[in-house]
Amino acid sequence: MDVEQQAPRRRGRPPRQRENLIETRELLLRAGLEVLTEKGFSATGIEEVLGRVGVPKGSFYHYFSSKEAFGLDLIERYGVFFARKLDRHLGNSSLAPLDRLRSFVADATDGMVRYEFRRGCLIGNLGQEMGALPESFRDRLKETFEDWQVRLAACLREAQKAGEIAPDADTEQLAAVFWIGWEGAVLRAKLERSAKPLKVFAGFFFAGLAAG
């Protein structure tokens, strides 16, 4: 009996079933970012994320191997999203370097006001929960903070060249100080439901640069 040749796989768009899987997974990640920036990881149940997307209970593990894997994907997704935001502001060559940072601060502040201070920073939220989180999160969170510091340090070096800050200033350390202080200000702003902590920290940071 002749063996029939298998029809070649069609190229182009993936099968509809695969498209649905990708689309649903993407919706779950977006919903996860919304919930976790408001409530944190430990206080978020998978059922709540599924409910926002309309995915049946029990289907979660069809898209993610575990809640831990879901969390790691969220960290990566948020890190990429936030890095793009930073690049948009800190890489804006139409502004002086320190004005680029001020632009980021203003945009981030407006974002917290828009969501009535319900949402904070996912990376900062998870960092505060670290004692109750899977150990695999620790290195991923540190890497994300370090990536943001590298991007800011590059902008501060441009500020040095432009004479906006002292030529002997340690830009890497200044970048670390900014993110340590900024994350604390975001937490306080969320607690108080006020932009005042963000403005206080930013004012103190920029005043310190000018004094230096």
Image (tube, helix red, strand yellow):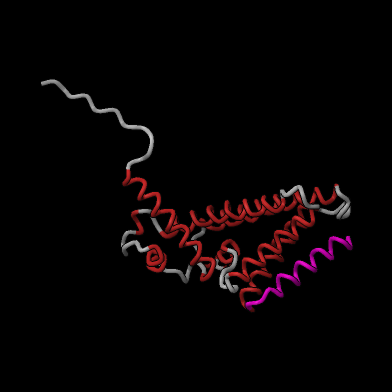
Compared across the picture, whether 99 is left or right of 84 comes to right
Q: Single out the residue that lies furthest toward the front.
A: 94
Residue at 72% x, 58% y: name it: 176
Residue at 47% x, 62% y: name it: 32
Q: Quadrant of residue 181?
A: bottom right
Compared across the picture, whether 149 is left or right of 52 comes to right
Q: Single out the residue that lies furthest toward the top.
A: 2
Whether residue 134 is situated above or below residue 19 in the rendered picture: below
Viewport quadrant of the N terminus = top left
First to last magenta residue range: 193-212
Pinpoint residue 108: horizontal percent, then vertical percent: 66, 63
Number of numbered discs visible in the structure rendering = 0
Do we see residue 31 in this rendering?
A: yes
Do we see residue 64 in this rendering?
A: no
Residue at 31% x, 31% y: name it: 9
Pinpoint residue 95: horizontal percent, then vertical percent: 78, 52
Q: Is residue 1 magenta?
A: no
Asked whether 168 or 156 is in front, the reply is: 156
Asked whether 67 or 94 is in front, the reply is: 94
Whether residue 150 is situated above or below residue 115 in the rendered picture: above
Pinpoint residue 66: horizontal percent, then vertical percent: 40, 57
Viewport quadrant of the C terminus = bottom right
Whether residue 152 is situated above or below residue 14 in the rendered picture: below
Q: Single out the residue that lies furthest toward the left.
A: 1
Main secondary-structure element of the magenta-colored stretch: helix
Residue at 65% x, 74% y: name it: 189
Asked whether 69 or 109 is in front, the reply is: 109
Compared across the picture, whether 104 is left or right of 137 comes to right
